[in-house]
Image (tube, grey):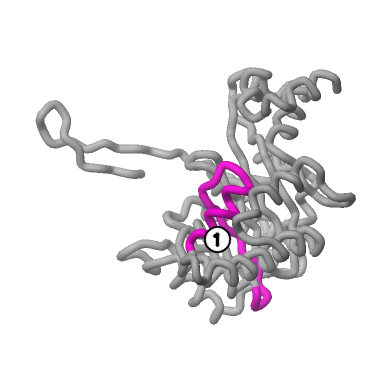
Amino acid sequence: VNATGIQKLGGDGIEITLRALPETTPTFESVSLEPELYDHLEPRSGMIVIAGATGQGKSTTMAAITRRHLEANPARKIIDLQAPIEFAYSDVLNDAEDRASVIGQSEIGEGRNLNTFADGVWTALRRAPQVINIGEARDRETMTAAIEACLTGHIVNTTTHAGSIAEALRRMASVYPTEERDGRAYDLITSLQLCVVQHLVRTGDERGRVPVREYLLFDDDIRSRFTSTSVGDWTAGVTELLETPPPGALAKPLWRSAVELVKAGRITQAEARRFIPRSKVEAIATE
């Protein structure tokens, strides 16, 4: 619930925005997560980034990933930092009373459990977790803490506002001043395991929404390509990797995801068109 004071017809009023949350914690199936990503969501350490605009289901997808961590064997301790807390995982915890995984949730904000995400991460490092969820890595302090957590052997799941992988990388690097950027960019790429960008579009029957996703797995080969180039060249590097990935790479551009959803009958060509560049339209028609 969000309530904001406004002026209405010359008098005082309140605008109230409500978001309904399901009682059931989402699963990989309910968020239509691509099966090829499953095995890459539980690395030994490193950062998994879910990117997208506001309202594109980032928190819901991250909740599904957290559910997988809670249900994993061996058991894990998870620290969940959110602003606000949206999913409580009570159904998962109640259904898995014989499991030893635990989750500690803290709400971020003035007057809440912790003031900032960065405070939450530094505190989490003293609580012996295996997984740290950061609602959003949006400033220098939070990004620094997240990278440190990765480099000290933790899994970090976080989100950022971005419409593409190239934009997500730029945003995360741009929180640092110019004199620090190259060094911190190296730490960022070293920490990254997977970046997923999603856009929700209406299904063909207009009864729901389905994500169009772009993703890139940062294995050793991919990392070396970025660490050997400057931040300014990352956009070109991402474009090349998504369009012509090296053998064995896990990479998919938005337009390819949109085409597959059209072929599966899940979205219309009209919905898919905004993700498909003109240069690809003719090539797709011949497939």
User: The residue tagged with tag 1: helix, strand or loop?
Assistant: helix
| Left or right of 170 in this view: 65 | right
Residue at (22% x, 38% y) in the render: 14
| Left or right of 265 in this view: 93 | left
| Left or right of 195 in this view: 43 | right
Magenta region, residue range: 151-175
| Left or right of 85 in this view: 166 | right
Q: Percent from the top left, x then y, of residue 75?
A: 71, 69
Q: Percent from the top left, x then y, of residue 116?
A: 40, 66
Amino acid carrying mark 1 in the image = Ala
Mark 1 lies on residue:
173
Residue at (20% x, 37% y) in the render: 6
Q: Percent from the top left, x then y, of residue 37?
A: 76, 49
Quadrant containing the C terminus is top right
Residue at (36% x, 44% y) in the render: 1
Q: Does the magenta stretch include residue 138?
A: no
Quadrant hosting residue 274: top right
Residue found at the far left of this picture? 10
Q: Does the magenta stretch include residue 157?
A: yes
Residue at (39% x, 69% y) in the render: 114
Quadrant hosting residue 198: top right
